[in-house]
Image (cartoon, helix red, strand yellow):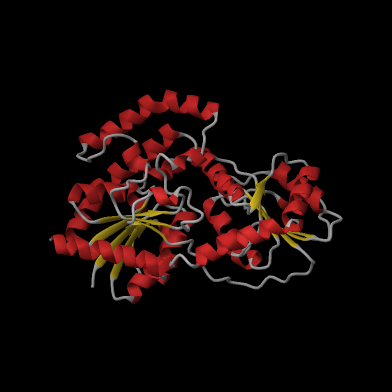
Amino acid sequence: MATIVFFCIPAHGHTNPTLNVVRELVSRGHRVVYYSYDDFREKIEDAGAEFHSCNGFDAQLGLTREDGAKIGSDLALSTRVLVDTTLALDEPVCREMERLKPDCIVADSMAVWGKAVAKKLGIPFVCSTTTFAFNRESSKIMPHSLKEMVSMVFSMGKVNAQVKRLQKAGYPVRSVLDLIGSDESIPTVVYTSALFQPCAETFPKHFAFVGPSIRPARSEVEKTGKELVYISMGTVNNEMLPLYRACIQAVKDTRWQVILSVGDQVDLKKLGDLPENVSVYPSVDQIAVLQKADAFLTHCGMNSASEGLYFGVPLVMLPQTSEQGGVAARTEQLGAGLRLKKTTPDAIRAALETAMSDPSYRENAGRISESFRASGGAKAAADCIEGCCFAGKKKG
């Protein structure tokens, strides 16, 4: 039996894919210790892991909601948060790892404190990547806008100052790329298929493309129309009242059954009177809806896009960040969706009609679905992690 430690950031989209892997490792007789945040305790313990809270050391708790929304696009802010959290967790986590003596550490690609501690203490390490893996070739799918590039250039001074803080604390990091880039020298579990991953052939064999981890549906959704359209802009940046109003205007007087999930920041009363074919909720069981859906209008977050494509649903895409733009670009390349170029009611209706009337979109989404299902899932991820554990014991 091995002792395996997981580290993750406080985000459902990064935690959920690991839970089936935890279950698989526990079923094989391993001890899994999972360091995360109190909001995630129940689901982590349900997966069979021992939960350890990081809340007492969490530098992110001081962030405003506006800061949280900017983390994905503000490199200086992101680096500061990562470094603050790593240094806050440095002493207690190192002390814990020396006590536990784990055979392997598995850390989310953004939970850089896990990777940093593993490097510092010489513990075998596996990276858990819930986005695409990025190297020089695959990163070309995410071109930055001129505004983003200028912002990045002017932020590099602040970024480098944060990296020096880690270097002074004894962490072997050379640049910000050591924090946020894919390290091709270490085993990495990537929660997508080799087909969906851009330039998969350019990564080494110890990158395991295991496909998305899809939980079972928790409820039943009744399909009452000939076609079911699902609209959701995710759980983070979803205060988009004008867009939701345009969507409602676009789908009224159609034959479609429409389910709209708007998050908890929107006053439902401000949406006005709803057509009979439209149902609006703060949240839904997305898996249950996608099992019945014929089109999915999405922000194209990696998890949402993967869930839609897993069930062979064509995507209409409105990305809000460069990462989401990369997912949208790959989906377009594979012919499984189309990008929404305008957010007028006419443009929204036309895009949804195209996604559902052109059979190539569903056929190509089905091809990606098949690749997801054939990628090995939690068993393949557990194999990768076990290999790291046993390799570490052989070296010892």
Image quarter where the N terminus lies is: bottom left
Q: Is residue 310 left or right of residue 103?
A: right
Taking 167 as reference, is 198 above or below it? below
Residue 147 is situated, as x and y percent measured from the top left of the image, at 54, 26
Residue 45 is situated, as x and y percent measured from the top left of the image, at 39, 69
Q: Quadrant of residue 28?
A: bottom left
Residue 321 is situated, as x and y percent measured from the top left of the image, at 55, 40
Residue 245 is situated, as x and y percent measured from the top left of the image, at 76, 46
Q: Quadrant of residue 139?
A: top left
Taking 15 as reference, is 59 above or below it? above
Q: Which residue sits at x=42%, y=44%?
A: 134
Q: Is residue 48 visible?
A: no
Q: Is residue 239 visible?
A: yes
Q: Which residue sits at x=56%, y=60%?
A: 368
Q: Quadrant of residue 379?
A: bottom left
Residue furthest to the left = 396
Image quarter where the C terminus lies is: bottom left
Q: Is residue 55 left or right of residue 216?
A: left
Looking at this view, is 159 or 145 the one in front? 145
Q: Which residue sits at x=63%, y=54%?
A: 336
Q: Is residue 320 left or right of residue 394?
A: right
Looking at this view, is 384 or 108 the one in front? 384
